Amino acid sequence: MISRGVERFRDQQELAEDKRPHETSAGSRLMRSYVLQVADQIKLYLDGKHPNGRRRNKWSKLIQTVDADKMAMFALRQVIGSVFRNSTTVVTVCNDIGRSCEDELRFMHFETEYKEYYDSLIRDFDRKNLVNYNHKRRVLTAKGADRGLQWESWSVEAWFGVGQTVLSLLMEVCDLVEIKHIPKGRGRQEVAIVPTEACIKWITDHNDVTELTNPDRMPCLIPPMDWTTPTDGGFFSPSLRRRTPLIKARSVDSYRTEMHNNADMDGVLTAINSMQKTGWKVNKTVHDTMKEIWAKNLECGMPRSEPYEFPVCPLAEGQSAADLEEGSEIQEAFSEWKSATRELHTLEKERVAKNLALLRTMRLAREMVQHDEFYYVYQCDFRGRVYCTSTGLNPQGTDQSKALISFSSGKALGESGFRWFLINGANKYGYDKASYDGRVAWVFENAEKFMAVADDPVGHRAIWGEADKPWQFLAWCLEFREAMDMDDYTKYVSHLPVGLDGSCNGLQHFSAMLTDKVGGKAVNLMPSDKPEDIYQAVADVAYNKLKDLAAEGVGGAINWLDVLGDDMPRSLTKTPVMTLPYGSTQQACTSSIYAWVHKHHPDAFEKNTMFRHSLFLSPIIWSSISEVVIAARAAMDWIQDCSSVVGKDNHGLEYVSPIGFPVLQKTMKYDSKKIETQIGGRLQLRIATSTKEINVRKQRQGSSPNLVHHVDACHMMMTINAAAAEGITEFAMIHDDFGTHAADAEILQRCIRSTFVELHTNNDILGDFKREQEERTGLTLPDVPARGDLVLEDIIKSPYFFG
C-alpha cells in the first residue's frame, strides 16, 4: 500500500514537473515559504530601505508599477521551474520574469478598458480548461489588439532589466539557486541558473517524506487488528497504523488528543471492530458485466462519457455586456447564460470526478477478484461518523462499488430472509414507497423480466438500467434467478447485503429530539399501513403553491405547471429535503433544481431561461420544506444561535455522544494572504496562519450538521452492538443505511428501532448540549425549543422507520 502511494505520488509529480513545476508538492511548498519574503525585499528596495543600502536602478519605475506580491510569485515560478529543469540560462529566466510583469500590466489595462469582454474571454478559458500560459497570452494579446487596445510594448532590454533586478532581490533572501558559468565547448560558456546543493537536498528530503505519508490504503486479506485505543488497531503494519489512527482530524492538538485518550469509548471500539470483522468478496458476474458495459461505452448505470455542451454566449462578437440596457431581452439572456454556464461547469466537474472514481473502483475490483475474502479498516471523523479507509471499492461507495462486492460468507434465506430479500430488490429498483406486501407482490409480477436480466445482463440492460440503483439491482437479479431455480428458495444461500434505509435520517433525529408529531409522521416515526414519503409531501405543498401562483397569472408558475403536468415528482425535492439537516442552503436548492431540469427536461423552457426558472422555483420549494418540518428547522436554528453565543465569547463547541465519543468543533479564523494574477484569472496562492480567534460565522454554519451527524453515528454504533449481541456477524453500514444478510434483516430492523428509542428516551440531546456548553463556558444560552407530544415508544411499532 505504501509502495502504491509512492508510485501515485511520483506519477503526479512527474506530470506537474513537465509543465508546471511550481505546482508540485515541493514547488508549492517553496512558493508558500518564500513568496512573502521576496515580496518584502522588493518593497524595501523600492522604498529605498534595502538592508544593504542598495540603490534603485533605471528599471525601478517599471518594477514599481507591478504589485510586489505578484512580482515575487512570477519570479519564484520561473526560478522553481529552473530548479526542476536543473539549469536554465539567466537570460531566459530574467526575460520570462520581465515579460510576466508586462503581461500583468497589459491585461489589467485590458480588463479596465473592456471589463465584460475581458471577463468573457477568461470564462471561455475556464470552460475549455485551458492552462497553457503562452496560449492564453497570445489570445488575450490578439483580442486586445482587435478591440483597439493601446499598449506600448516593453523592449527585450526592459524585460531583462526588470527580471534581472527582481531575480537578484530574490537571491538575496533565499538560497534556492546560484549562477554558474557552464562550459558549452569550443571555449564557449553559458551563464545559467542552477539549484544549490541545499535546494536539491531539501527537495529530495521533502519528496522522500511526502511520498510515504499517503499510502494507497487497500482492503486487508485477513481481519484487521481490533481497535483497543484511538491509536492501536486497524492495519497491522506500524507504519500504516501511525498514518491511520481511529479518529482522523484536520488538525491534531494536545487538547483534542487528551479528550480522545481520556474518553470511555468501549462501545465505539466494539462497534467498529464488528464492522472490521465482516468479510467481503468481488461479485464476479457483476464485475464481468461492468467491464463489458464500459468497454462498449454503453453508459448503462454509469456517468455519461461525453462532456456537457455549454450554451453559446448570446452577445455578438465585440459586443460588451457593459453596454446592455438594464432589463432588455439581450441583457436577461446574457445573465441567464452566465448562470447556466456556471451550473454546467459544476455538473461537468461532477461528471469527470464520477468517471475517475469509477475507473479507480473497477481497477481495484480487478485486483481483488483473485481473493476469496478480504476485509476493511474503518476510521471515525471528528464527529464519530465511521468511514472506510479504502477509497473506490468499498461498501460505503457508489452504486457500482457496492454492487461489485458482497459478503464472503453466505447465509440461507429462510422464510423471513426470503421476504426481506424480495423487499430489497424492490428497494434497489426504486419501488420503495409501497407497503412491504406491495413490494413483494411487485417483484413476483415482474419476476420473468428480472430473471431474463440475470440470463443476459447486457442484452436486457434497458430493464435494470432504469433502476434507482442499477448495479445493485443487477446484483440482486443474479441472486434472484438462482433462488427461483431452487426447489426450496428459502434454502438459497445469499451473499448480498440487505440495506435498511432511514427516512431522511437527519430529520428523524431532529423530530425525535423535539418529540415533534408533524415531522415525526412525515419521516415514519409513527406506525402506519404504508410508508410516509416526506419528499413527496414537500413536493405536494410546493405544487399547490405553484397552482395558486398560476391562477394569479404568474408566468413562471404557469411554465412550471406545463412541464410538471398533474403533480410534482418527489425526485425534484429529494436532494433539498435530504440535505437540509446537514447544512444545505437555498442556493444549493437552486443548483439541485437546475440539475434536475437539465437531466429530465432539457428542452422544456425557452432558450436561455432554464436557470431563471430554477431560481423562480427555489424559494417555493425551500419554504415548503419548512412547512413540513417545522420543529426540525426550529432545532437547527436554535443550535446555530447557541453556537453564535459561544463563538462570540471565543469558545468552541464540545460535547460527548451517549456512546462516549467526544466531539470538539473549534473553527478558527485564519490570517490569509491571497495573490491572484491577471493572466488565466485563477492562478492564486494562499498563505494562511491560524489565529487564536474563533470564526463565528463558519462555526455557526457547521454546528447543526455536526451535532446531528454525531447523533446518527451514535445510533449506528448502538445498533451494531445490539445486533451483534443477538448473533449478527456481518455488517454493511453507511451512516443512515444499515445492512446485513437477508436472513438477519428482521433482527437488525428490530435493533434499529429499539436503539433509536433508547437513544432519545434516555438522553435529552439538545438539553445536554445546552448544559455542557453552559457549564464549560459560564454563558447562558437560549432556551431549548418547545417539545411536542410524539410518543417515542411508538417507533417500536413503526415498520417503515427503517426499511
Image: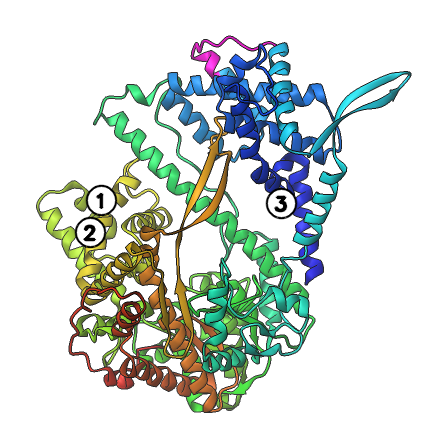
Q: Position of residue 217 (x, y in %)?
A: 62, 64
Membership of 148 in magenta stretch: yes
Q: Amino acid at mark 3?
A: Ser
Q: Amino acid at mark 1?
A: Phe
Label 2: element kind: helix
Q: Using the image, determine if residue 334 lies above or below residue 800.
A: above
Asked if residue 91 can be seen in this view, the reply is: yes
Quarter placement of the N terminus: bottom right
Q: Using the image, determine if residue 548 lies above or below residue 538.
A: above
Q: Earlier in the sequence, mark 2 or mark 3?
A: 3
Quarter placement of the C terminus: bottom left
Main SS, magenta residues: loop
Q: Position of residue 631 (x, y in %)?
A: 19, 67
Q: Using the image, determine if residue 406 lies above or below residue 126.
A: below
The structure residue drawn at horizontal position 8% and vertical position 45%, both measured from the top left corner, is: 552
Is residue 411 toward the left or the right of residue 553 in the image? Answer: right
Residue beneath label 2, please?
620
Which span of residues is magenta-colored?
143-155
Label 3: element kind: helix
Which residue is more in the foreground, 635 or 618?
635
Membership of 253 in magenta stretch: no
* Label 1: how many Cα within 10 Å (few below 14, some 14–19, many 20+): some
Q: Which mark is residue 25?
A: 3
Confirm or deny contact between disc 1 and disc 2 (CB under 8 A). yes
Residue beneath label 1, please?
616
